[in-house]
Image (cartoon, rainbow, N blue to C red):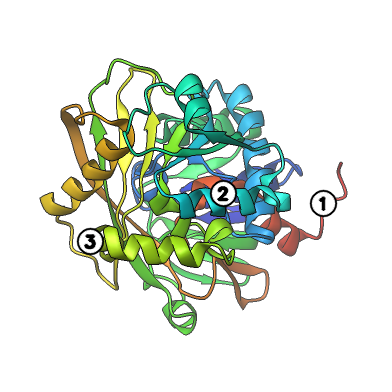
Amino acid sequence: MPRSYDLAVVGSGIVGLASALAAARRGKRVVVIDRDAQANGASVRNFGFITITGQERGDMWARAKRSRDVWVEVAEAAGIDMIHRGLIMAVRRPESMVLLEAFLQTEMGQGCEILDAKALKADHGYLAGSELLGGLWSPHEVRVESRQAIPAVAAWLDDHHGVTFMRQTAVVGVETGKVVTTKGVIEADCVAVCPGDDLISLFPERVAAYGVTRCKLQMLRLADPGFRLSGAVMSDLGLVRYAGYAALPQAHAVRARLEAEQAAQLANGIHLIVVQSADGSLVVGDSHHYGPTPDPFASEAVDQLILDEYEAVFGLSAPPVQERWTGTYASASDRTVLIDQPCQDVRLVMVTTGAGASTGFALGEEVVNELFGKDKAP
């Protein structure tokens, strides 16, 4: 195995893989170094839901669109199934319908459609909550099964792009031109440090300067409900968590209504996302709790608040729970991503808003453009 590369990537989560892909597409020699035997963090503990609609207006929305396009390209090349496409934002409050109408008038609403209660029932009959007033249909989203997709992307990078992977290898130091690991020194012209939510192993003072902490979430897998989703499902609670909606003036009335009616969900950072797997089971979540070292324990009360929202939207009891898990990701209150230059030809890269699957491929391209110059390829 060579010990010298054009790019060394620390971390094999989605941002690390995206950086490796962007460099490999330029013909660069790339090594990816990871302390675990396989991806085990946020990149495989999520919905696999590449979210466009509702991302923060501007850069994040543009990153999500670009990342979605790369996901489609990579999925076809790597044999990764797109489980379903599209998003239904189903809502129960008139204030939410007003907000959706306002969203539709922005550039972010292009291609989306407002559905009244009759159209929602006709097109998505499994959404049977008695209080549903309608919703927004977006055709832009795609969904993969993260647990299979992330390893498949890594295998494809190895097989088809010649990317070298060093697993079960800890990085103990990074400087210009050099990565020091527990298996020796790797020489690299450039280095992308993509540590996920590891805030202290590398450049902890740089991370601390940005006020980055960690967010813990709870998720569940439910048994096959006996119907097939026509797209991912979200609800009113998502309108105050996703900045593309929440930054609009009409969101104030939605938040006030939710504070009066669902204070417990807001206090636990709960919003509803429901996606379906190939076997029919549903992945449902999630919650948000913050701290430098989140505890590893899942609260039954928090899970029940998530399931309460599921039942309000679908109008029936939730199917049996097959799995429960927690995940963690890096979080910052004043930024969605962090790209820092701790030393020459080194970049420290984090997604700090839980949108790695949705924006990682675009972010990887940005990082490689910074390190090697803007790509002039079409």
Q: Secondary structure at mark 1?
A: loop
Give the residue type that dot 1 points to.
Asp
Give the residue type that dot 3 points to.
Ala
Circle 3 is placed at which residue position?
264
Q: CA distance from mark 2 to mark 3?
A: 24 Å
Q: Which residue does the image show at 69% across and 48% down from the upper left?
A: 23
- Above or below, 263 against 63 in this view is below
Q: Earlier in the sequence, mark 2 or mark 3?
A: 2
Q: Secondary structure at mark 3?
A: helix
- Above or below, 92 against 55 in this view is above
Question: Residue 233: x percent and y percent?
Answer: 43, 36
Q: Nearer the viewer, mark 2 or mark 3?
A: 2
Q: Which mark is residue 375?
A: 1
Q: CA distance from mark 2 to mark 1?
A: 37 Å
Q: Which residue does the image show at 39% across and 67% down from the upper left?
A: 256
Q: Which residue does the image show at 18% across and 53% down from the upper left?
A: 302
Relative to residue 344, is residue 47 drawn left or right?
Answer: left
Figure label count: 3
Give the residue type that dot 2 points to.
Leu
Q: Earlier in the sequence, mark 2 or mark 1?
A: 2
Question: Residue 170: x percent and y percent?
Answer: 37, 58
Relative to residue 319, is residue 190 drawn left or right?
Answer: right
Quarter of the rendering occupied by the C terminus:
top right
Q: Nearer the viewer, mark 3 or mark 1?
A: 3
